[in-house]
Amino acid sequence: ARELRLSPEERDTILLAAKVHDIGKIKIPDRILKKPCRLTPEEFTIIKSHTLEGAKIIEVCKNNPILTYARNIVLTHHEKFDGSGYPYGLRGEDIPRPGRIVAVADVFDAITSERVYKPAWPMEKALSYMKEQRGNQFDPEVVNAFLSIMCRSRV
């Protein structure tokens, strides 16, 4: 968000709001969340519901501006720039910018972290994947900002 020249206030709000981006996963059974192998199509449908479930959880906090902002991130962090994401199949700039930013951070965290169903990816493989997904899964501008930061931090 800083690299994209967002205001300090919006950067702070994204930082706080992003912390609850997966809150809807509390509604997903552990047998699915912690499954050590590939999900069935039915299980994946249940996993995808975490965005809508999270929005429902946050909906009750309508008077809290950060949580109202967070609801947008919760709903859109799995949308893909090419329109193939969920829950709505939004495309390009129809996806709110905070959702596009959190999508990049979320996927990078997921692929570089060990999970019950996969080992952590090496950094070079992860960065290569992020580059490959510019314009497909991710907003190219957001990926370019992310890669710029990663390159500076690796020098």
Image (cartoon, rainbow, N blue to C red):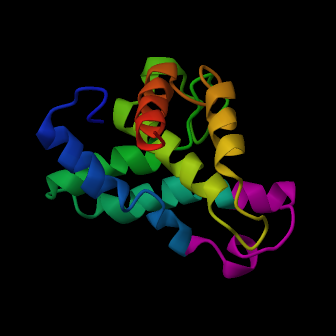
Q: Does the magenta stretch include residue 13?
A: no
Left or right: residue 42 versus residue 67 is right
Residue 56 pos. (x, y %): 41, 60
Identify the residue at image location x=12%, y=42%. 9
Q: Residue 114, relative to residue 86: is it above or below?
A: below
Q: Residue 150, relative to residue 96: is it above or below?
A: below
Query: Which image quadrant for residue 21?
Result: bottom left
Residue 42 pos. (x, y %): 81, 59
Q: Residue 112, relative to residue 83: is it above or below?
A: below
Q: Residue 64, relative to residue 79: is it above or below?
A: below
Q: Is residue 29 magenta?
A: yes
Residue 6 pos. (x, y %): 22, 30
Identify the residue at image location x=62%, y=38%. 127
Residue 136 pos. (x, y %): 65, 24
Identify the residue at image location x=70%, y=52%. 122
Give the magenta-colored segment's residue range: 27-46
Residue found farthest to the bottom: 30
Instruction: Work out which quarter of the rendered image holds the N terminus and state it.
Output: top left
Q: Which of 97 and 151 is in front in this view?
A: 151
Left or right: residue 74 versus residue 89 is left
Left or right: residue 51 versus residue 36 is left
Q: Nearer the viewer, residue 97 or 71?
A: 97
Left or right: residue 44 versus residue 143 is right
Query: Which image quadrant for residue 99?
Result: top left
